[in-house]
Amino acid sequence: MKACIKNACFVAGLIVSFVHFSCGNGNPTSNPIKSSTIMNASTETITFAAGCFWCVEAVYQRVKGVKSVTSGYMGGKMKNPTYREVCSGLTGHAEVCQLTFDPKIVSFETLLEVFWQTHDPTTLNRQGADTGTQYRSAIFYHSEAQKIAADQWKAKLNGQKVFPNPIVTEITQASTFYPAEDYHQNYFNQNGQEPYCQIVIKPKMDKFLKAFKDKLN
């Protein structure tokens, strides 16, 4: 918690970087992959929504102890939604990244710290120029322990007024996860020279890498 408070200015810097560019248009004809999550006794799963999933994926891919990051959709009412359908804002899904991580290497609390500090959790259904319920801030927990930890962090951050406005992050139980189309996976690593990546994701990544240098692969 102390680290989160100390890095409040880092959060403010990230908010500024979101203002002008929205999550890009990919190939709308790609087919979604049916949801499936493979776990073993040594890993846990958590699902985060923090705006465009390209940004969230790029951040968590670099955290030591995170074994996999898959971009996708969660929290809606339509089965097997496509990117185009989710972008309409009518399916109820959020753009999310589902992580599998080794709790012996990285704690859930560290993943939460990264979550709070790498997006603006005080803007309802918006991250910079990305607007709509699909860009809402949300933690989709996979265990009661995760729910308790997320609720406690949110309450403490609000209580200590770490952010200028109240946190609006949704904390809800994980539902069916639909992996996004193939072209969304590993997006920043494969498309780092595209305008959205250079103008929105890279500045955010630079701040993240500096703030969390002791937590990186």
Image: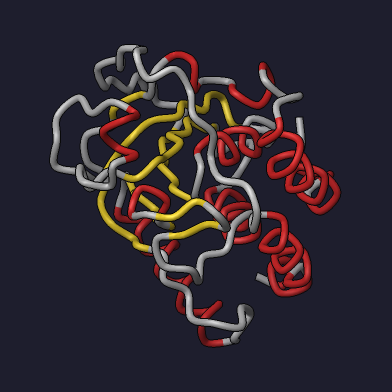
Residue 153 seen by the camera = no
Locate residue 83, reporting x and y percent: 34, 29
Q: How is the image coloured?
A: secondary structure
- Residue 82 relative to residue 207: left or right: left
**Quarter containing the N terminus:** bottom right
Locate residue 128, reporting x and y percent: 57, 58
**Quarter containing the C terminus:** top right
- Residue 74 relative to residue 209: left or right: left
**106 and 13: which is toward the camera:** 13
Seen in the picture, residue 138 relative to 86 is either above or below; the reply is below
Image point (55%, 54%), residue name: 129
Question: Residue 82 is drawn in which quadrant?
Answer: top left
Image point (69%, 40%), residue name: 201
Image point (47%, 74%), residue name: 167
Residue 106 seen by the camera = yes
Seen in the picture, residue 66 relative to 1 is either above or below; the reply is above
Seen in the picture, residue 50 relative to 215 is either above or below; the reply is below
Question: Residue 33 is drawn in which quadrant?
Answer: top left
Locate residue 14, reporting x and y percent: 71, 58
Question: Residue 149 is drawn in which quadrant?
Answer: bottom left
Image point (22%, 41%), residue name: 175
**70 and 130: which is toward the camera:** 130
Please count the marks in the image.
0
